[in-house]
Amino acid sequence: MKLISFAVPCYNSQDYMRRCIDSLLPGGNDIEIIIVDDGSTDSTYEIAEEYQKKYPEIIRVIHKSNGGHGSAVNSGLAAAKGLYFKVVDSDDRLEKPAYLKILKILKKYAYSGKTLDLLISNFFYDNKDENTKTTMRYRSFLPKNRIFGWNDIGIPLKGSYILMHSVVYRTQLLRKCRLVLPENTFYVDNLFVFKPMPYVRTMYYLDMDFYDYIIGRDDQSVREDVMISRIDQQIRVNKEMYRFFSENYDRITASRKRARYMLNYLEIITAVSSIMLIRSGTKDHIAKKDELWQYMKERDRRIYRKLRISVLGIGLNLPGKWGRSIASGVYSIFRNIWKFN
């Protein structure tokens, strides 16, 4: 059995997928790389086949009809044979020093008899347009270099939450929680790091920069203009996260610190949805913001009250143009600090 399976979703990735795959190869025979060609129309198919032919013991290729990022992740997870599982998008890459360290950690716990559900590491926003790198770390609320549980974590800062780029899951945990991401929908990476959390018992945080998240492309899904154009998909993911929290309320809140962490994450995603709708400025989008909050109120008042009285919740629901201007200004501050989109 392989130590770790890397799923690499590819859609028309011919211009950058080689850089990504080459950064995974130092793992050698301990790893498998599952290249998922999600119905590409460029040379992605040929490049994937070339790598599979060159590294048959390491690389497998799945060719499928286009179903979006979530569909590609689902296919990669279904095919995975590794003890652990990680998604690496085809336009990103891994940093070798942290990569080799992570393989050592996974090996240690794979053969020690201790179960490690989730390994967390740092990632950085690599903005090619601005020539800047901003590292996202978790040292403010996660213990370092040891196994820990939910009771051991601290209070995450606003805007600090664990993203897909940061995580390596135990494969069987993802299958146990029956994780299936929606197809033909962007922003499902938020579900990938939200739904498994009630099943996670043991974690390890390596305070090293592992994942190079490259941003700045004109068509990238996290660009503000692109997010506004796809706002219905953002809302869909937001509602699914909220529904999941509601349906698993007792399990999630069995751990006070886990509940606080997951509520913080849900608050941030709801803030992003709301602010994108506010910044768009159309009557239709303002109405969609109000509908989102009404949905949450009707779905589960326990969660709604917590979100509504939070600092972000109050700011996002101030009345009139002044309220919307304040919410938009807060978003700009967060964006400048964290360097997203």
Image (cartoon, helix red, strand yellow):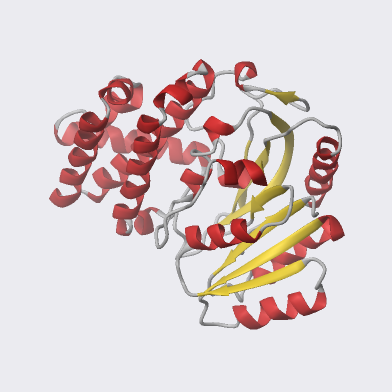
Please give the name of the residue rendered at 65% of the width and 68% of the height, measured from the top-left corner.
Answer: 35
How many marks can you see?
0
Q: Nearer the viewer, residue 168 or 312?
A: 168
Q: Position of residue 27 (x, y in %)?
A: 83, 56
Is residue 316 positioned above or below 55 on the image? above
Is residue 141 positioned above or below 293 on the image? above
Residue 161 visible, this orientation: no
Please give the name of the residue rendered at 46% of the width and 72% of the height, measured from the top-left corner.
Answer: 66
**Quarter of the N terminus within the rendering:** bottom right
Horizontal side of 111 relative to 187 (left or right) equals: right
Q: Position of residue 129 (x, y in %)?
A: 55, 59
Horizontal side of 8 relative to 312 (left or right) equals: right
Residue 118 visible, this orientation: yes
Q: Nearer the viewer, residue 198 or 20?
A: 198
Q: Nearer the viewer, residue 26 or 300?
A: 300
Please give the name of the residue rendered at 61% of the width and 76% of the height, measured from the top-left corner.
Answer: 14
Horizontal side of 220 relative to 203 (left or right) equals: left
Is residue 177 positioned above or below 3 on the image? above
Is residue 30 positioned above or below 91 on the image? above
Where residue 207 sits, quadrant-wise, is top right
Q: Position of residue 33 (x, y in %)?
A: 72, 63
Horizontal side of 171 relative to 58 (left or right) equals: left
Where residue 163 sits, quadrant-wise, is top right
Q: Position of residue 151 (x, y in %)?
A: 61, 16
Please give the name of the residue rendered at 15% of the width and 51% of the height, measured from the top-left corner.
Answer: 284
